[in-house]
Image (cartoon, rainbow, N blue to C red):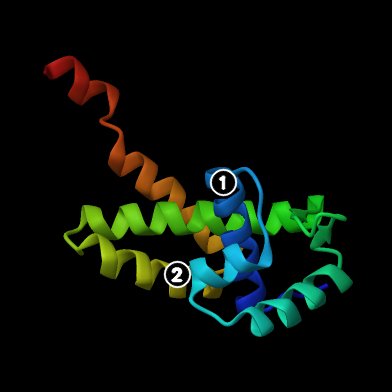
């Protein structure tokens, strides 16, 4: 089942809030993303109907295994792309905003290649380490 960019953003926000707060409610997502509670409620209903989240009796939101997979993929992309842009001189706020745009549009293969090249760039190779 295909998920849209906004759904990916919501799932990523849920993951980040869960890591920071230990729980997630609709109001937390609304506050984090700057959206109205009714907008969040509609989106959460869609995510629940499509199997990305569950909502318990206390109204806490939980990622399903499918939702967690998408959220973690988006978060990994966001972090790496932000770091990469910062490393080439882009200020952190701009890098984070632009990474958020890029993370949704590139294929898994393209991201894999970017990650591979960036990791080589970030880590000094063995011959350079031995010269130091």
- Gap in angstroms between the C-alphas marked 1 and 2: 22 Å
Quadrant containing the C terminus is top left
Would residue 6 appear left or right of 54 to someone viewing this image? left
* Label 1 close to label 2 by CB (< 8 Å): no
Residue 101 horizontal/vertical position (percent)? 45, 75
Q: Residue at x 51, y 72 (%)?
A: 33
Q: Residue at x 24, y 57 (%)?
A: 86
Which residue does the numbered mark 1 point to in the structure image? 21
The mark closer to the camera, 1 or 2, is 1
Residue 8 horizontal/vertical position (percent)? 63, 69
Quarter holding residue 22: top right
Residue 127 horizontal/vertical position (percent)? 23, 22
Which residue does the numbered mark 2 point to in the structure image? 100
Toward the top, the furthest residue is 130
Q: Is residue 101 above or below residue 32?
A: below
Would residue 31 appear left or right of 46 to someone viewing this image? left
Would residue 72 appear left or right of 132 to someone viewing this image? right
Q: Residues within 10 Å of mark 2 (few under 14, many from 20)?
A: many
Quarter holding residue 53: bottom right
Q: Earlier in the sequence, mark 1 or mark 2?
A: 1
Q: Secondary structure at mark 1?
A: helix
Q: Residues within 10 Å of mark 1 (few under 14, many from 20)?
A: few
Mark linked to residue 53? none
């Amino acid at each position: 089942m295909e998920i849209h960019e906004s759904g990916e953003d919501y799932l990523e926000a849920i993951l980040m809030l869960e890591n920071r707060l230990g729980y997630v409610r609709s109001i937390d997502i609304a506050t984090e993303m700057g959206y109205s509670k009714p907008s969040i409620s509609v989106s959460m209903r869609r995510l629940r109907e499509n199997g990305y989240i569950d909502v318990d009796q206390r109204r806490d939101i939980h990622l399903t295994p499918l939702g967690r997979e998408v959220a973690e993929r988006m978060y990994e992309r966001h972090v790496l792309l932000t770091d990469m842009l910062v490393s080439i001189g882009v200020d952190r706020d701009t890098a984070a905003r632009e990474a958020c745009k890029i993370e949704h549009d590139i294929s898994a293969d393209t991201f894999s290649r970017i990650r591979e090249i960036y990791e080589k760039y970030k880590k000094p190779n063995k011959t350079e380490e031995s010269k130091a």
